[in-house]
């Protein structure tokens, strides 16, 4: 399940809803990861642009990779502005075994940072400024992934 939300994520609502959805699935492990916007370099927050077709394909590939392990993946991400100390990213793995869930969440989050087609902007004095120094080029993205 991939969810996109406008603005910051309601962490408690999303995690509770996901837990409730899977509570009868006989999973032994539920490992969530919550990404929060940090106060750094004088930013007021971050703003995100998402290219949904590629993000959906990337997520579907991960779902297919997790299925033979008996694991289920869920992810939520923000579009638009997210202020400091608010959440922009939540991922979770449900699995019968804790080791599978722990390994999968680590790999999933790291691959998300390296591969997801989401562009990040700093919010400074009400303006969006591309966060080039903290962005990762996406393989095959051409000019969209290039750093100059």
Image (cartoon, grey):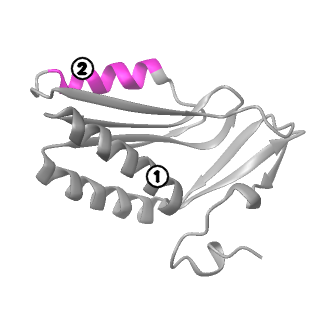
Which class describes the residues within 10 Å of circle 1: few (<14), some (14-19), or many (20+)? few
Q: Is residue 88 shown to the viewer in this render? A: yes
Looking at marks 2 and 1 on the same chain, the residue that comes earlier in the sequence is marked by 2
Q: Position of residue 140 (x, y in %)?
A: 51, 79
- Residue found 75% across the figure and 61% down from its top: 132
Residue 95: percent from the left, percent from the top? 18, 36
In this rendering, the label closer to the viewer, 2 or 1: 1
Residue drawn at (27%, 23%) of the image:
19
Q: Is residue 117 left or right of residue 48?
A: left
Pointer 2 local density, CA inside 10 Å: few below 14, some 14–19, many at least 20: few
Q: Which residue is mark 1?
A: 110
Residue lying furthest front in this view?
99
* Closest to the observer, 138 or 79: 138
Residue for point 90% across, 39% down: 125
Left or right: where does residue 118 sit relative to residue 60? right
| Above or below for 2 versus 84 | below
In the rendered view of the protein, which quadrant contains the C terminus? bottom right
Residue 83, image x and y in percent?
71, 31
In this picture, residue 116 sits left or right of residue 23 = right
Asked if residue 14 is among those painted magenta in the image, a careful observer would answer: yes
Quarter residue 101 falls in: top left
Q: Is residue 139 magenta?
A: no
Local secondary structure at mark 1: helix
Most common SS among magenta residues: helix
How many numbered callouts? Answer: 2
Magenta range is 12-23
Residue toward you, 42 or 98: 98
Residue indicated by mark 2: 20
Residue 1 seen by the camera = no
Element assignment for label 2:
helix
Alpha carbon of mark 2 to alpha carbon of mark 1: how far? 26 Å
> Residue at left 30%, top 27%?
18
């Amino acid at each position: 399940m991939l969810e996109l939300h406008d603005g910051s994520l309601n962490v408690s609502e999303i995690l509770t809803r996901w837990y409730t959805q899977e509570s009868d699935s006989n999973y032994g492990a539920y490992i969530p990861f919550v990404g929060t916007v940090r106060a750094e370099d004088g930013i007021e927050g971050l703003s995100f642009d998402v290219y949904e077709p590629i993000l959906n394909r990337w997520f579907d590939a991960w779902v297919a990779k997790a299925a033979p392990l008996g694991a289920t993946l869920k992810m939520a991400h923000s579009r638009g502005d997210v202020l400091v100390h608010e959440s922009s990213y939540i991922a979770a793995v449900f699995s019968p075994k804790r080791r599978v869930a722990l390994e999968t969440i680590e790999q999933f989050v790291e691959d998300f940072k390296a591969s997801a087609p989401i562009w990040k902007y700093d919010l400074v004095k009400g303006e969006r400024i591309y966060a080039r120094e903290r962005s990762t080029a996406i393989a095959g993205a051409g000019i969209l992934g290039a750093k100059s």
